[in-house]
Image: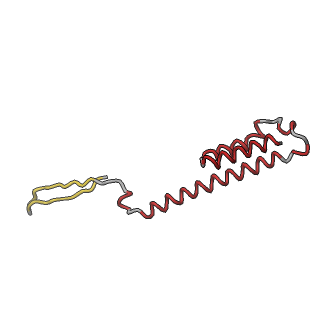
Amino acid sequence: AAAIDSLVNHLHNLQQERKLKEVTLYSARFLQSLPVLVKTIQLTLPPSTHQTIPQLQARSTALFSSWNEDLVSRLRTRMEELVNLDAFNIMPAWDTLNIKEDGESGEVTTTIRVP
């Protein structure tokens, strides 16, 4: 149990030190899959520490929530930036073609915008 607590603390410290959001996601996924991948974890722990697996699941859920909140926050910030931009700057550039033709009433100029 002490080794698992040490692992969880190490992953938490790694996340805090490096400020890498990918570490949060990878850590959450690792803690989520650990009991499944290591079937003997329940057998090797003393009966008094059988709460370790629910603790791993709870920590995994907390890490997923943290990652999700950060992702939504970054998305919200980027969407707000788009709202504040001028719509014509976001749209792709359009080429303007001028077509000149001689007609019965004289020269006719038509302007066409092409994406």
- In this rendering, the answer to whether 20 lies above or below 105 is above
Instruction: Identify the residue at image location x=70%, y=41%.
Output: 30
Give percent across and percent down for residue 14.
66, 45
Quarter containing the N terminus: top right
Label tally: 0
Position in image of residue 44 (x %, y %)? 86, 36
Q: Quadrant of residue 84?
A: bottom left
Q: Position of residue 40 (x, y in %)?
A: 83, 35
Image quadrant assignment for residue 83: bottom left
Position of residue 79 relative to residue 38, above or below, is below
Residue 70 rendering spot, x and y as whole percentages: 60, 55
Of all residues, the one furthest to the front in this rendering is 17
What residue is shown at x 10% (from left), y 56% (from top)?
A: 102
**Looking at the image, which residue is at 24% across and 55% down?**
96
- Left or right of 73? Residue 66 is right
Tell me: 15 left or right of 8.
left
- 65 left or right of 43? left
The chosen color scheme is secondary structure
